[in-house]
Image (cartoon, rainbow, N blue to C red):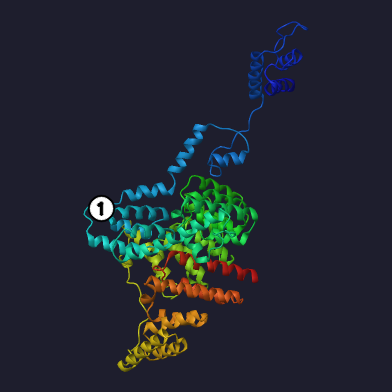
Amino acid sequence: MRAARDAVERAVLNGLGALGPEELAAARQALGEAPSAPAGEETPATAHDATRLLLALCGRVRREVQPPELPAQDTDATTTLERLDAALVGTMDDERLAAAEREALRRHPARAAEQRVAGLREPRDLLRLVTGGSTWERRAAVLRLEEFLRGDGRGFAAADRKATAEALELEREGALAREIDLVLAAVSGAPGGRARARVARAQKLLERLEKDVRRFWDGDLPEDPVVALDDEALATLGTFAADAPDVVVGHLGETLRRLTAERDATTLERVVSALALGADERLVPSLLRVLQDAEVPARVHAARSLARVDDPRVPAALRKAYRHAGTPDEQVALAGALAAHGDRRGAGAVLDHLGADQPPHVLELALEALVATGEPANVGRVIPFLKQGRVSTARAAAAALGAFGDGAALEALEQAGSRAELRPQAERSLAQVRARLDLAGALPPSAVPRPAKGDTPRPARTRLAARAVGRLYYALGLLWLGTGRRVAALGAFELAVAQHPYLLGPRLARARILLRRKELEGAVESLRGAIRVRAATVLQLPDRANFVIRAYLRYADSCTASGRHLRALEALDELLGYDLRFADVDLRLEAQRRREFVARDQRREE
């Protein structure tokens, strides 16, 4: 057989007529053929003889060398790539494989969400789904509401359109913030104006970044423009990556691959974490490279990003990464990402890490994964964590209950809302649970939505004379500030607050002055007082809410730089406990990222 193979290989490499009589005879003998001529009378091989020998050899090899069979389709290997990876070599029936993959795509939660949304006709039902549905259902419902808001919905009155836009603006949470802003940008009124301002700011950044990327590749810019972005701009890029031009997305993908190859773990984690809410399908190959070759923290962030991408390449890669996960952090994050794509094989592992004996960061990752893997039967396992002294753990538990809880979670969430630092998240989770129950027609009579709690009740009003004096000092402070006398303005504002404690203007102006003077602790204390007095007035105006976030972030950076990680964590937990729905989503993402990084630095020091 070896002689026949060598003969055919020589014929292919050197020409079909290169076989001599002796080689032709040896090849025929190896293949079990009788000689065509007596010994000593063989003629040189013709092209026909060489071709026939080649075909005979292929047939013999196919009969004698059987390729290894791939494992049968099961829960551990359900796609072509995974089964090839499991068996290393081999072939199978292509039609059967293609049919299995098409069936897996049809079972994807995104397809089920589209079918459910297609059956809803009332905008109110769509709004309930936007509030209490899964990520895929919320996204599909927002797209349906876009038809009504842009005037395509028949019988949709202008007043109803305005009310729907205002209600939709309050649902700007997580991965849907960009989609909702794009929908509201085409609507008139205050919500549309605010959405257009946010989208315009993002577009301005993307246009500037496109110019910098071209300059970088032309050799006119020495530093990578993506890596050079500050944290806020990087969060904006990650949130609006789907709107970025191909040049920017291509460069971003190349940056991810380069940082992965260079093992620059810190920079890579900083860039990948910004994509937690806005990963685009064009970035899937680069994110899969990070998921395969990067360090554990970057892989966790890559799994979060891929959980929100509807791409057929993602589930197979997540399953492979889950099989090779080596740490609890990675295993839990990948289990949540798989569940988001309809694969619940990691649900048991998530519950295994849901214990008070687990490290706090692993417990919080497990609660985060429960947003996708959880079901009503798990409510009893999560409720005890609402009483955790660690605010971030209690907040993660409330978010998980909001994602999958039923009527059994209502009372526990209402009790958790009595804690000021949990009130916004508890109210958000209550709204999610009630929306799902109402949509299913199972809302208990006792679970009628309660009005949101407002600002801290005021004691007896100050005397009219004191209020007038306070406003006078405020006006005097503005005068000093206009002439550049900041010290005098600070004194006037402090006197105004002493006379009129419920006047917001002096508190906010004082915070801005102290922030410019880099007296960050005083600025945060002034903002804290303003929020304590009138939280809605401060946090429901986007510019003020953004200013609050930036001030707290700068204060947290200052505490971290001086080694006070615990104080930085307390400040960031306090910030994330505010109702930040009207703030820009990239700033909210940056606050969450910063808290995670500070917590990791603290664990390393301990």
Residue density around tag 1, few if under 14, some if 14–19, many if 20 or more, within 10 Å: some
Residue 272 visible (yes or no): yes
| Residue farthest right in this picture | 40
| 252 is higher (above) or lower (below) than 416 | above
Query: For residue 597, which quarter of the picture?
Result: bottom right
Residue 416 visible (yes or no): no
Q: Is residue 214 left or right of residue 168?
A: right
Between 372 and 441, the one lying in front of the other is 372
Residue placed at 62% from the left, 52% from the top?
293
Between 446 and 129, the one lying in front of the other is 129
Residue placed at 44% from the left, 63% from the top?
401
| Residue farthest bottom in this picture | 465
Q: Quadrant where the C terminus lies?
A: bottom right
Regarding mark 1 in the picture, which secondary structure is present there?
Answer: loop
- Identify the residue under disc 1: 153
Between 604 and 10, the one lying in front of the other is 10
Indicate the position of residue 164 as horizontal and vertical percent values: 29, 61
The amino acid type, in three-letter code, at marker 1 is Gly
Residue placed at 52% from the left, 82% from the top?
519
